Amino acid sequence: MARRATRTAAALMLLAVMSLVLWAAQGLAARVRVNAARVANPVRDDEDDFRRRVLAAQVARALARGQERRGNLPADKLAPVGAGHKLRKDAAERFRLLLKQAESDLRRQQEAGDPKALKVSDIGVYSAYRSVEEDEAAWHNSFGKHFRETREARAALRGGAYGDEAVEMMVGIMRKFKAAPGFSYHTSGTAVDFTTTEGGLCLTANSSRNVRWRKTWLYNWLVNNAARFEFNPLSTEAWHWEYGKRHERRAGI
């Protein structure tokens, strides 16, 4: 019996040792696979570095033009403008009047049977005040979109898709469509992005829909009426309007 118990204990010990060896081997293999993947596919690191260089260059350009880096607005400086969005109090007051007038004019034109107005089922706010953190997320989303769209064009540049010329290209594009975090008029609480649903199509802040936006009832109304409420357009985005006199505004969204 003692001899059988000894053999059983030895077998169990051998099984435990073999399990430990197998576990260690699996762990080592997993680490080897991860490291091999990193060596074989450094694209992600290149993309991250490229993104950081583009952002740094865009910030440097903004500062060189004399733009102010903004921080978050205190809650007591903001006021609601609808759909859970807020603007700086003075901008919010004027915007509520603007939206009320737009809604009134839309109803009046629909009652009169205006074909263009009859296609509109909704107008409102898509985005307004954004904190620096929210605007940083918006910048990264916008960067990702334009990064994918410019892949072939960047690859054809001297230095390739991640070279200095590619950085310059991306900075030029981002300046048109998305200010660096902290430099946006959304963070100042004076910019609003509209949304409208017309002909069953919901339009929001989407650069691929600029042409369609400019044909909407709401855009046409804003062009003819927004200045009365001290809101002015951004040339590159039909849905984006900013509060303030034109001569007080600088480039940036």
Image (cartoon, grey):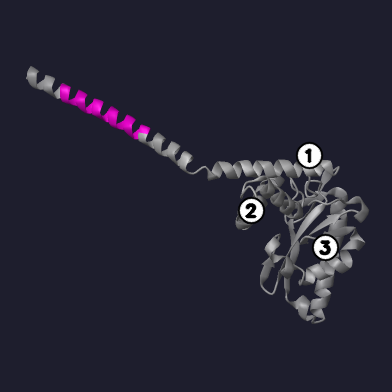
Q: Is residue 35 left or right of residue 109?
A: left
Mark-to-mark CA distance, 1 and 2:
33 Å
Task: Decide: few, some or many residues near mark 1? Use Cα within 10 Å; few <14, some 14-19, many ≥20.
Answer: some
Q: Which amino acid does label 2 sit on?
A: Arg
Q: Which amino acid does label 1 sit on?
A: Gly
Q: Are marks 1 and 2 in contact (CB under 8 Å)?
A: no
Q: Position of residue 185 (x, y in %)?
A: 80, 49
Q: Which disc number belongs to residue 99?
A: 3
Mark-to-mark CA distance, 3 and 2:
42 Å
Task: Decide: few, some or many residues near mark 3? Use Cα within 10 Å; few <14, some 14-19, many ≥20.
Answer: some
Say which element carries label 2. Answer: helix
Single out the mark in the foreground, 1 or 2.
Answer: 2
Prevailing secondary structure of the magenta residues: helix
Q: Which disc number belongs to residue 154?
A: 2
- Figure check: 239 above or below 160: below
Q: Which amino acid does label 3 sit on?
A: Leu
Q: Which of 244 and 120 is in front in this view?
A: 244
Q: Is residue 84 left or right of residue 147?
A: right
Segment tinted magenta in the rendering? 10-28
Q: Where is residue 228 in the image (x, y as percent from the top left)?
A: 92, 62
Say which element carries label 3. Answer: helix
Which residue: 32% across, 32% down?
Answer: 25
Which residue: 76% across, 71% down?
Answer: 216
Q: Where is residue 209 in the image (x, y as percent from the top left)?
A: 70, 66
Q: Which disc number belongs to residue 71?
A: 1
